[in-house]
Image (cartoon, helix red, strand yellow):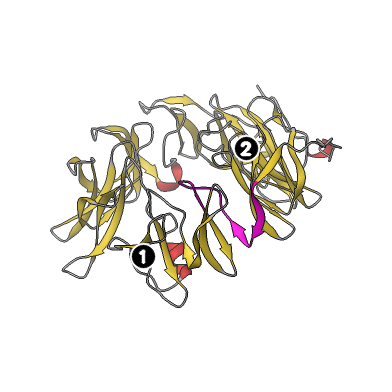
Amino acid sequence: MKYFQLFLSSLFFISVAFATDEAYEFVIPAQFDHIDSFSESLARFQSNGLCGFINEKGEIVIPAQFRFAEPFQHGRSIAWLRGSKERFFIDKAGKRLDSTFIPQVEDLVTHYIRFPHEFSFNDGLASYSEKGADSKTHYGFINTNYEVKLPAIYSYASSFHEGLAAVDISADGLVKTGFINAAGEIVIPPTYKNVDFFAEGLSRVSKDGNLYGFIDKAGKTVIPEIYGSSDISHYFSNGLVIASSDGAWQFLDKEGKIAAIPTWNKERYEIKSFEPFGADGLAAFFSEPAESLDEPLGAHWGTWGLMNKKGEVVIEPQFVDISSPVPGEVAMRVAQLGYKEFVMIHPIKGVLPQLYEAANDFSEGLAAVMVKDKFGYINTDGEWVISPQFETAMQFKGGIAAVKQNGKYGLIRLKK
């Protein structure tokens, strides 16, 4: 059933009442050029172009001395000094540690592009790389103590997901991909050219790199490799995967059977692509006007809408962009109508009426949104928890959020 149709003409700014007794307090006063939320009890701050770390008492534990430093992860941060290209580990006292597992790069841009989330631990393991005797890069795995768990013997290694990691193995001059477990045992032999991570017990695979299907954790084919790369989603979510066969969209279950066939007003628009189902049980779809229409649906040629698992359109296409619900959070979405026009989509109430100039995803039940060039925080009902007053506002993590006020950053938390 469609619980919300086109609403663009009826949406407007509504007057809001802000609490006079603010619900927050500063943990760290706004005094830094930048600051992040706490990670392992330390927050990274920036002052005069250099990074350091501060504890929850507001005490500077590691003075600002690094050109760049990652947030702490399992007791270590990756840092480098101004004027140096060498990256190294530091401990929580700022002491330099052995940096065997850190690939060295030429500049900070390369660091961000090649290693945006170094190291990515899943199931207690993270992949690392090193140069082999053949001068080629090989991959292995380290544990959270930064000790080698599996030596670097693979041509490539992905992160672990659901207990399995994809690895490339060279044999007879060919490189094929299979899956190993945390003990390094080959669970699914390397016979594939392309694979995706496991999600809900299944992985998308391709032996020839052109046609794709799905296998289970025993390597058994669940959906045969008959779909082009763009004709089937990369992973299962909510028990379904979205596929296109002979130009017709369909939702497939974990046995490869058709669970639903999407329906929509084909006289108005055609669906060109889908995003996987989110935690709200809805899938975002991208549409373009039907060829019979002379004018586009909205200000932009293509727009996004939402569809349920039965294949029914629940929110007609009208957004230029739409987010996916954040895992582990209330299944809220942020959608953009146009320039400085953002709304929130509630999993039950549909599109909330308030229009924002900017909006971030929800975290810990709160989202930072902008009204009249100032950020505040709302709850999942769209009610103001912290009135708009900040120049910048970040997501809450562990009950703490970084905000910018009067040109400086500090950390706030909700009052108890």
- Rendered image quadrant of residue 379: top right
Q: Position of residue 232 (x, y in %)?
A: 43, 40
Residue ranking furthest to the bottom: 83
Residues rendered magenta in the picture: 27-43
Lateral position of residue 187 relative to residue 103, left or right: left
Q: Residue at x 35, y 69 (%)?
A: 104
Q: Amino acid at mark 2?
A: Arg
Lateral position of residue 175 relative to residue 284, left or right: left
Quarter of the figure that contains the C terminus = top right
Quarter of the figure that contains the N terminus = top right
Q: Residue at x 63, y 30 (%)?
A: 313
Q: Residue at x 81, y 38 (%)?
A: 11
Q: Which residue is mark 1?
A: 88
Q: Is residue 43 above or below residue 268?
A: below
The total of numbered circles placed on residues is 2
What kind of element bears circle 1?
strand
Q: Amino acid at mark 1?
A: Phe
Q: Is residue 151 visible?
A: yes
Q: Earlier in the sequence, mark 1 or mark 2?
A: 1
Q: Which residue is mark 2?
A: 333
Q: Which class describes the residues within 10 Å of circle 1: few (<14), some (14-19), or many (20+)?
A: many
